[in-house]
Image: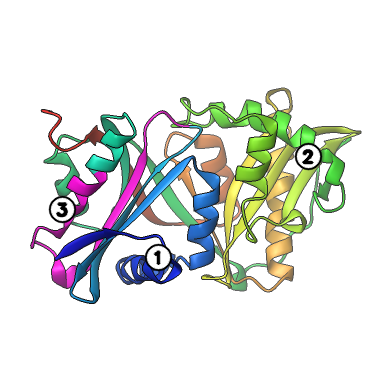
Amino acid sequence: MEIRRATTDDEVEALLSVHNTVHAHDRLGLTEMRSWESQVKELAMFVAWEGSRPVGAGSVALVAQRPDPHAEGWVLNEERRRGIGSALYETVSAQVAGWGKDQFEVPVEDSDPDGEAFVTTRGFTEIGREIRVSLDLTEVVAPEVNAPRGVTIVTWADRPESIRGMYEVAVQAFPDIPGQEEERVEPFEDWLAHDMQAGPGDRPEATFVALAGDEVVGYSKFSLSDAQPSVAHHDITGVKRAWRGRGVARALKQAQIAWAKNNGYEELRTQNEERNAPIRKLNAEFGYVPSGIRMFFRGPISGSGS
């Protein structure tokens, strides 16, 4: 078994073959990986090879908004308990150390019975968890958009000049999301490139803006994927602090559900930090149902002595 860095499209496709086998419900495509690469400061991808066959893979990224690198790793079920995961941990740790960091964060799905034990035995501790929820669009009727008095819901495609106002919303909204208190929104041009125009899944016609006159008071955005053509993923729903509790988020959610339903999508998916009670309550009212839990752990690089 040999671990090599993945840089070419064929090598990244090998990484994806492992990921999509382990997480068949959350398939990723080459477009999504290259888009992710354009959003982060650094990205290193690795594939564990048994001859010409990929048996494990992982990636680690330096994300501009967060202090610690974000890593993920996957090993084919039939290849586990052979040391492949440990070898990937060593490889990722060396990369993180090369970036001058001594710890990183990893997600673990509740559907992976081995993941939590793997990270906790290496000194990782849980720092948060997200509840995955989904909405079956084939079972719902497209809702009417009932915005609060004085508020209009449009798309970013309709009002491209609203982007500066959307940035002002992001600056307030992101740090207020439970579990993201450490995040800092990038300067405008970087945020625009990394959050709003990173790839073909970021579409102005699928981004919704709440306007009170000419003031942007909230926005919501989908992340769309060629690898999951029938599924639309909620990216963010943000509202200015002074406008919260007035029904702006509800109207934005109504606009998203109606757009996805009318454009032939069959399912909506999102994940909410378990402490984010307002958005979890709103999603439940629209009929979103739990579909899993993603836990986040922070821990030391290999050989750090922890």
Residue 54 locus on image (x, y percent): 25, 71
Other-residue count near label 1 (Cα within 10 Å), few / some / many at <14 / 14–19 / ≥20 = many
Q: Which element type, helix, strand or loop, lies under badge 3? A: helix
Q: In this view, does 20 lie above or below 154?
A: below
- Closer to the chain start, of discs 3 and 2, is 3
Task: Please name the residue shown 37% across and 37% down the image.
Answer: 69
Amino acid type at circle 2 is Ile
Q: Foreground residue, 281 or 82?
A: 82
Q: Foreground residue, 28 or 88?
A: 88
On residue 163, the disc is 2
- Residue range highlighted in magenta: 66-92
Query: Which residue does the numbered mark 1 point to in the structure image?
Result: 12
Q: Locate the N terminus and report the quarter of the image it occupies.
A: bottom left
Q: Nearer the viewer, mark 1 or mark 2?
A: 1
Residue 164 locus on image (x, y percent): 78, 34
Q: Which of marks 3 and 2 is in front?
A: 3
- Closer to the chain start, of discs 1 and 3, is 1
Residue 217 covered by magenta stretch: no
Task: Please name the residue shown 28% across and 54% down the image.
Answer: 73
Asked which quadrant contains residue 212, the reply is top right
Residue 80 covered by magenta stretch: yes
Colour style of the rendered protein structure = rainbow
Per the model, the C-alpha gap separating discs 1 and 3 is 19 Å
Q: Foreground residue, 85 or 210?
A: 85
Amino acid type at circle 1 is Val
Query: Which residue does the numbered mark 3 point to in the structure image?
Result: 87
Residue 111 locus on image (x, y percent): 28, 59
Residue furthest toward the left?
82
Amino acid type at circle 3 is Ala
Residue 103 locus on image (x, y percent): 27, 32
